[in-house]
Image (tube, grey):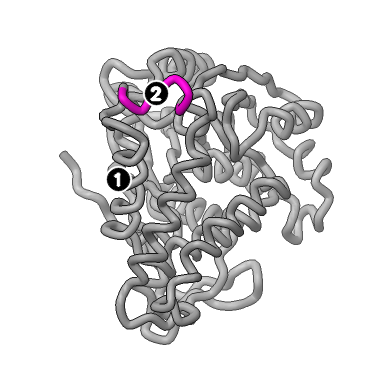
């Protein structure tokens, strides 16, 4: 199996005007590109994901079949693999790392696709959560390059409610006395654990807990689930990295750039890609109402919502077979020639 690769970008001017020094994207490709280069699928990473987690969406018995498609899984800035506060140029390490937008991520991803991989058309961009947000950004930023998008449990603009939720988990992390405004000498473990516990309460729906469905995914009880989420964040994540991506999430808005100058409806109308919007009606982060609004203005779009007590985590591979079945059906439809 291929190992992941690096694409060195050098110094990158960000949307803010600041410069990200010695930037790199870490990515992994699966499958082979065909002769006419028409089988390219871009699969960005989600908030606490890497290209490794994306492998759960790919398989020989899945719609994203590596025997048929050339799949490029790209790690977003801030996830600890691509340039992040934890691995940045010495002058931008830790709390000195600049704010990154989804525009910046997609600008660099497009350079990877076009300059490194020599691809000028992408058959499909898709993803869960923040990866889905990146699919909208791709379609609005490079409308002539993207043929189809499939964002699931995502939105083209972070809602106020979603923003407030993120302020809550951020407050839990930064309340740790070891946080020191990001200048910590050791990871703020108590804050990271608190972050994970708060996050867990929003990741699933109310009925998930009422029906004790946590037992179906390997947890004996609620305490077991909360402890696992807390320990996972404390063990596997750097605090500045988490907050870097959190800020990117909060700033998500495909119209906030020089192309659309804050005209959100114009940015939605600019999307030429065939689009399937796939929310979960029980998702507490990304609400179906936001996707219904998007559908009004994205010309070639349809909305296919799913009901599941797993809420936002319906898309986590293995959680909900019905969701997986419908996701693969929608992917196959968009990739059908």
Q: Which residue is mark 1?
A: 228
Residue 274 included in the magenta stretch of the image: no
Q: Is residue 192 above or below residue 267?
A: below
- The residues colored magenta run 209-215
Q: Is residue 323 above or below residue 316?
A: above
Name the quadrant of the N terminus: top left
Predominant secondary structure, magenta span: helix
Q: Is residue 180 left or right of residue 216?
A: right
* Residue 66, horizontal then vertical, whole percent: 29, 27
Q: CA distance from mark 1 to mark 2?
A: 16 Å
Could you tell me how many numbered marks the image carries? 2
Q: Which residue is mark 2?
A: 212
Residue 211 included in the magenta stretch of the image: yes
Of badges 1 and 2, nearer the viewer stands 2
Viewer-proximal residue, 223 or 167? 223
Q: Residues within 10 Å of mark 2 (few under 14, many from 20)?
A: few
Q: Is residue 229 left or right of residue 124?
A: left
Residue beneath the point at 28% across and 24% down:
59
Residue beneath the point at 33% across and 24% down:
318
């Amino acid at each position: 199996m291929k190992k992941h690769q690096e694409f060195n970008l050098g110094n990158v001017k960000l949307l803010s005007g600041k410069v990200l020094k010695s930037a790199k994207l870490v990515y992994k490709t699966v499958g082979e590109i065909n002769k006419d280069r028409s089988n390219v699928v871009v699969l960005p990473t989600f908030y606490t994901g890497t290209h490794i987690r994306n492998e759960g969406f790919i398989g020989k018995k899945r719609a994203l079949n590596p025997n048929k498609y050339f799949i490029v899984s790209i790690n977003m800035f801030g996830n600890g693999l691509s340039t992040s506060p934890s691995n940045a140029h010495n002058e931008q390490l830790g709390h000195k790392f600049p704010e990154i937008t989804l525009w910046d991520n997609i600008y660099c991803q497009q350079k990877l696709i076009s300059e490194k991989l020599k691809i000028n058309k992408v058959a499909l961009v898709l993803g869960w959560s923040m990866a889905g947000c990146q699919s909208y950004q791709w379609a609005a930023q490079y409308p002539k390059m993207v043929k189809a998008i499939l964002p699931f449990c995502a939105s083209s603009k972070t809602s106020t409610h979603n923003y407030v939720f993120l302020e809550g988990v951020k407050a839990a992390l930064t309340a740790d006395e070891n946080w020191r405004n990001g200048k910590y000498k050791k990871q703020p473990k108590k804050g990271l654990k608190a972050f994970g516990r708060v996050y867990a309460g929003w990741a699933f729906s109310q009925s998930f807990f009422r029906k004790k469905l946590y037992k179906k995914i390997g947890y004996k009880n609620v305490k077991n689930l909360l402890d696992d989420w807390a320990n996972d964040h404390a063990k596997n994540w750097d605090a500045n990295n988490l907050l870097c991506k959190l800020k990117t999430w909060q700033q998500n808005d495909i119209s906030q750039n020089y192309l659309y100058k804050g005209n959100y409806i114009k940015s939605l109308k600019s999307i030429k890609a065939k689009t399937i919007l796939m929310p979960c009606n029980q998702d507490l982060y990304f609400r179906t109402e936001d996707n219904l609004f998007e559908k009004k203005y994205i010309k070639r779009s349809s909305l296919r919502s799913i009901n599941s007590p797993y809420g936002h985590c319906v898309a986590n591979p293995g959680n909900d077979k019905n969701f997986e079945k419908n996701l693969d059906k929608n992917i196959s439809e968009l990739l059908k020639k």
